[in-house]
Image: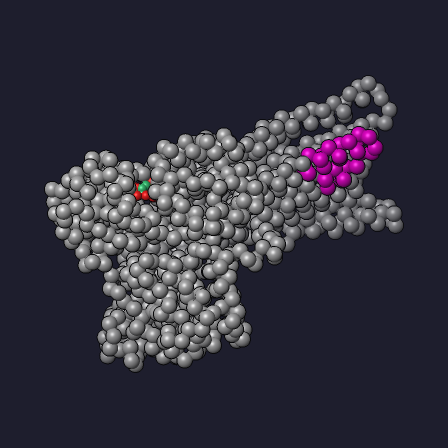
């Protein structure tokens, strides 16, 4: 039984997927825990209210293990969820529920879309018990009322009895058994009110705890969003199950739908809410060539997506497995507590028995007192609060992290996060965007090769590499109208930290840094070369042993990188840079960061990074490594906490890392550290609190008077407090308001939000928007570059009459400068900034790499809207010229735009509403461009939704 092996790690696994989505995908489950086998498997999520302590975890496992067809059982104590992987033919859901309910565990199958929310009201048992108990308090008026206390016991006890019986019959001493013994003892001693109080308090506390936990787990299931079960094939319009979508299939995703698969946009434009994956609350524009991920929501346009991964291999599915696995690995603290708890309960029970029996055997007086003391001890034998103190806090912290776009692979990692003393950052793709642009390219030597040939060879070879520089070189060739052909590349090799080698048309070509020169045994000295070209990162092309070309490239640092490092500094954490790039590039980045890095290490090979991480650990203590690339994998693994950047980062980096930042927002790094510290504090408070309360109760009972109900209250009360205290982790940490100014805390997204607020309030304040922009450019040297991620949005002021760039008031100019921070190609927002009456959030376009500009984004702005770049379709040099003139009544496809190339595209891109949203008439055959854009009218017919059309 697979479930058996997992018994150790059972109690705190998470669930991320909505039950049905997972349930309908046997392959996904099979992939999850290995050994899926050929038989059909189903994953069922059950709400099991009776799960309280670790004792029940073993119980659940023992109940389900004998059932035929049950394969894996996971119990999530924090959310009272049991996840069962089973063969529905051999073990139907009903059989599983029945088995659990036989033991009074109050199990039910979670319905689709619900998040395990249980009834908010107490069960009739609790209510009846409470009413009767209250009535019994009036015994001083009428002594026979005392019997009502016994009735309160009878009314409230059934669920306890059922669970306790199930546990006892399996020889396990769970909390229910202990409480029942206490109740029985109180009844024997004639303390009816006490007995009634125990039952009432215990059941009430359990109910409150369930409510609290449910709240936590509700957050978890909303985390991943609702993965759709069906997908629409774009070419045929056929609706198929997501698991039947093959790689390469093109699926249609309409406005308001969840993207069903990971893939690349091939047609259409839209904004996508990736919050579920990245924690980023600002919509991300998507256009052809943009990547999209399953589980994210298409907000406002039609897109066709070419699938790049099977549903079970989608990022969200991988994340689910990752988090499930994470919960299987218990943290050090948790393991310690669990092993203590194992001995604690039996030990206390033995001592309690001694306290009850020894005085009696010795014939001591006041036996009742001794027995009461024994009962108090029994009640205190429940290690519940202590056992819950770590997993519930970890659960909440990881949930909070996931909501912020940080996936943490386990409680151990969480605890280590709080101990970090030094952080090593990789440069390319981590501190910088990893979006290089070629500043210059020269032929070298006696010009034996022609530029066109060389570029063709380079681009073809680089097409096989995933290094950020490769993309820049390919793009550069394409900008010279040279199309790479990777198929012609014969031998291809990657030299980590150096460059690449490829053979094409009989030529042996090396592309890379200085080390490559040596490898290719090129006679030129690099000294000499350095004088030939000025630039930050310099690359060499060696063709058949001779230097044939030399190029320089540059890259900009990410928004918020400097601030992230400053924040780490304020937490007492040292930051260093480790890069495979040249020292000039490292220094350049340091300059952009305002010199915040404590150390720079450049021209490193992957093994050097590992060595340096080891050095940091020795010098400063626990060390974090943040990286993205393949050659960071070893260093990530070597660090105490390895953090990989971004969902689109290298798979190897993600696999070996201990945590993953789902967005490329470096500011999440200090946030993660803070969260780790908070989690450690919370766990410490939980542990100390639960131990202290237990000790105090026992001491009081021994020294003064054993009060049974107080002991019960202390026990269940601490359980509840532990849960509530852990849940404070779910809340955002309060940060002082003073932090905001000066630093570039105001990231693009907050700027955008601010300007939208301004617009919403119908009190546009151009000066404010300008000030916000200045804050960003001043505080943060790294300006957003036109591109595809949310931080690339900037505030642009657009004049109401939709006029051109000729007039630019100062405040707008400041903002716009940021846009051009990107490409050396002169991609500029300059074109787009316009004075305005209304604050508008515009996007820097581009993304195609082709100097498309923000001019594109200009939209007449009579209404406050999120403007969009049209075009941005790489290679075509599309501008938005066409759409700039779109009429104030948004989205009409008519008028002056008609004649320009790409009209249809611009038209759709002026989103909200799209052309299609204008109604079926728009797409009638009389308007061929529109019809084409809307994919033969189908899109129009389908997205026609008056709800989407905003006036
Ligand atoms: N595909 C490639 N094309 C051209 N040059 C390359 C390529 N791959 C690597 N190089 C060269 O090798 C150097 C080191 O690469 P490596 O991937 O180790 O580090 P990096 O990505 O530049 O920086 P970091 O370590 O900060 O991520 C690069 O700076 C570049 O000069
Ligand atoms: Zn308990």
Q: Residue at x 76, y 22 (%)?
A: 357
Residue 900 sits in quarter: bottom left
Residue 355 % position (x, y):
76, 24
Location of the C terminus (image quadrant)? bottom left
Read off the magenta span. Answer: 689-714
Number of numbered labels in the structure image: 0
Q: Is residue 343 visible?
A: yes
Please give left or right for residue 940 compared with residue 202 in the image. left
> Is residue 338 or residue 744 the one in the foreground?
744
Give the quadrant of ligand 1: top left
> Is residue 472 or residue 867 the one in the foreground?
472
Q: Is residue 265 visible?
A: no
Location of the N terminus (image quadrant)? top left
Residue 889 to residue 537: above or below: below
Please give left or right for residue 320 compared with residue 721 in the image. left
Residue 721 sits in quarter: top right
Residue 232 % position (x, y):
31, 60
């Amino acid at each position: 039984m697979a479930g058996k092996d997992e018994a150790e790690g059972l109690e705190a696994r998470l669930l991320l997927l909505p039950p049905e989505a997972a349930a309908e995908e046997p392959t996904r489950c099979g992939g999850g825990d290995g050994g899926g086998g050929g038989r059909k498997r189903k994953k069922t999520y059950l709400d099991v209210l009776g799960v309280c302590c670790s004792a029940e975890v073993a119980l659940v496992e023992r109940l389900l293990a004998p059932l035929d067809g049950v394969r894996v059982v996971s119990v999530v104590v924090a959310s009272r969820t049991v996840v069962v992987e089973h063969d529905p033919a051999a073990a139907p859901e009903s059989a599983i529920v029945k088995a659990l309910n036989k033991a009074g565990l109050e199990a039910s199958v979670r319905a689709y879309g619900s998040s395990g929310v249980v009834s908010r009201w107490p069960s009739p048992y609790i209510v009846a018990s409470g009413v009767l108990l209250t009535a019994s308090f009036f015994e001083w008026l009428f002594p026979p009322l005392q019997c009502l206390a016994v009735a309160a016991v009878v009314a409230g006890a059934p669920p306890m009895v059922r669970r306790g019986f199930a546990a006892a019959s399996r020889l396990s001493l769970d909390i229910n058994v202990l409480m029942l013994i206490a109740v029985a003892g109180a009844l024997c001693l004639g303390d009816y009110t006490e007995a009634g109080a125990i039952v009432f308090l215990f059941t009430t506390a359990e109910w409150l705890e369930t409510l609290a936990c449910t709240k936590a787990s509700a957050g978890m299931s909303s985390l991943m969003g609702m993965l759709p079960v069906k997908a629409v094939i774009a070419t045929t319009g056929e609706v198929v199950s997501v698991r039947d979508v093959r790689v390469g299939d093109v699926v249609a995703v309409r406005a308001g739908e969840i993207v069903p698969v990971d893939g690349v946009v091939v047609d259409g434009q839209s904004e996508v809410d990736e919050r579920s994956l990245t924690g980023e609350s600002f919509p991300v524009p998507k256009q052809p060539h943009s990547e999209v991920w399953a589980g994210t929501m298409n907000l406002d346009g039609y897109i066709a997506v070419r699938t790049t991964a099977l549903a079970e291999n989608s990022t969200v599915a991988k994340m689910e497995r990752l988090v499930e696995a994470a919960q299987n690995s218990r943290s050090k603290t948790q393991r310690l507590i669990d092993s203590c708890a194992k001995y604690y309960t039996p030990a206390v029970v033995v001592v309690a028995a001694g306290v009850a029996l020894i005085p009696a055997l010795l014939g001591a007086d006041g036996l009742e007192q001794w027995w009461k003391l024994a009962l108090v001890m029994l009640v205190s034998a429940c290690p519940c609060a202590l056992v819950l103190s770590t997993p519930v806090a970890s659960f909440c912290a990881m949930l909070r992290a996931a909501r912020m776009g940080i996936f943490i692979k386990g409680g151990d990692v969480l605890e280590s996060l709080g101990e970090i003393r030094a952080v090593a950052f990789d440069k390319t793709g981590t501190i910088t965007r990893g979006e290089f642009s070629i500043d210059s390219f020269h032929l070298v030597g006696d010009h034996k090769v022609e530029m066109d040939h060389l570029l063709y060879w380079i681009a073809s070879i680089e097409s096989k590499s995933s290094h950020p520089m490769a993309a820049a070189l390919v793009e550069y060739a394409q900008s010279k109208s040279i199309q790479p052909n990777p198929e012609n590349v014969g031998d291809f090799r990657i030299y980590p930290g150096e460059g690449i080698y490829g053979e094409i048309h009989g030529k042996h070509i090396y592309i890379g840094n200085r080390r490559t020169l040596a490898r290719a045994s090129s006679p030129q000295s690099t000294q000499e070369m350095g004088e030939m070209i000025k630039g930050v990162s310099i690359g060499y092309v060696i063709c058949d042993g001779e230097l044939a070309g030399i190029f320089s490239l540059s890259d900009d640092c990410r928004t918020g990188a400097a601030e992230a490092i400053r924040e780490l500094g304020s937490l007492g954490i040292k930051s260093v840079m480790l890069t495979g790039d040249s020292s000039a590039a490292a220094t350049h980045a340091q300059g952009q960061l305002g010199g915040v890095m404590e150390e720079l290490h450049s021209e490193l090979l992957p093994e050097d990074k590992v060595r340096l991480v080891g050095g940091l650990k020795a010098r400063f203590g626990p060390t974090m490594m943040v990286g993205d690339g393949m050659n960071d994998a070893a260093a990530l693994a070597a660090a105490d906490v390895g953090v990989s950047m971004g969902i689109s980062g290298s798979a190897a980096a993600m696999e070996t890392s201990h945590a993953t930042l789902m967005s490329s927002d470096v500011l999440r790094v200090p946030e993660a550290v803070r969260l780790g510290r908070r989690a450690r504090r919370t766990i410490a408070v939980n542990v100390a609190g639960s131990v202290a309360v237990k000790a105090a109760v026992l001491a009081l009972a021994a020294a003064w008077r054993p009060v049974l109900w107080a002991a019960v209250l202390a026990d269940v009360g601490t359980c509840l407090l532990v849960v509530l205290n852990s849940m404070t982790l779910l809340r955002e940490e309060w940060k002082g308001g003073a932090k905001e100014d000066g630093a570039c805390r105001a990231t693009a997204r907050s700027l955008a939000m601010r300007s939208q607020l301004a617009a919403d309030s119908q009190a546009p304040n151009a000066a404010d928007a300008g000030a916000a922009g200045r804050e960003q450019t001043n505080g943060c040297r790294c300006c957003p570059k036109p591109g595809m991620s949310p931080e690339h949005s900037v505030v642009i002021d657009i004049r109401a009459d939709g006029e051109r760039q000729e007039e630019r008031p100062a405040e707008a100019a400041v903002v716009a400068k940021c846009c051009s921070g990107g490409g050396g190609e002169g991609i500029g927002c300059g074109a787009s900034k316009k004075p305005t009456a209304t604050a508008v959030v515009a996007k820097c376009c581009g993304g195609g790499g082709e100097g498309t500009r923000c001019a594109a984004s200009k939209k007449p702005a009579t209404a406050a809207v999120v403007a969009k770049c049209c075009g941005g379709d790489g290679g075509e040099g599309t501008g938005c010229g066409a759409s700039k003139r779109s009429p104030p009544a948004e989205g009409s496809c008519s008028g002056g735009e008609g004649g320009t190339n790409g009209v249809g595209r611009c038209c759709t891109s002026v989103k909200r509403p799209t052309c299609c949203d204008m109604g079926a008439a728009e797409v009638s055959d009389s308007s061929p461009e529109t019809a084409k854009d809307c994919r033969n009218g189908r899109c129009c017919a389908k997205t026609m939704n008056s709800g989407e059309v905003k006036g």
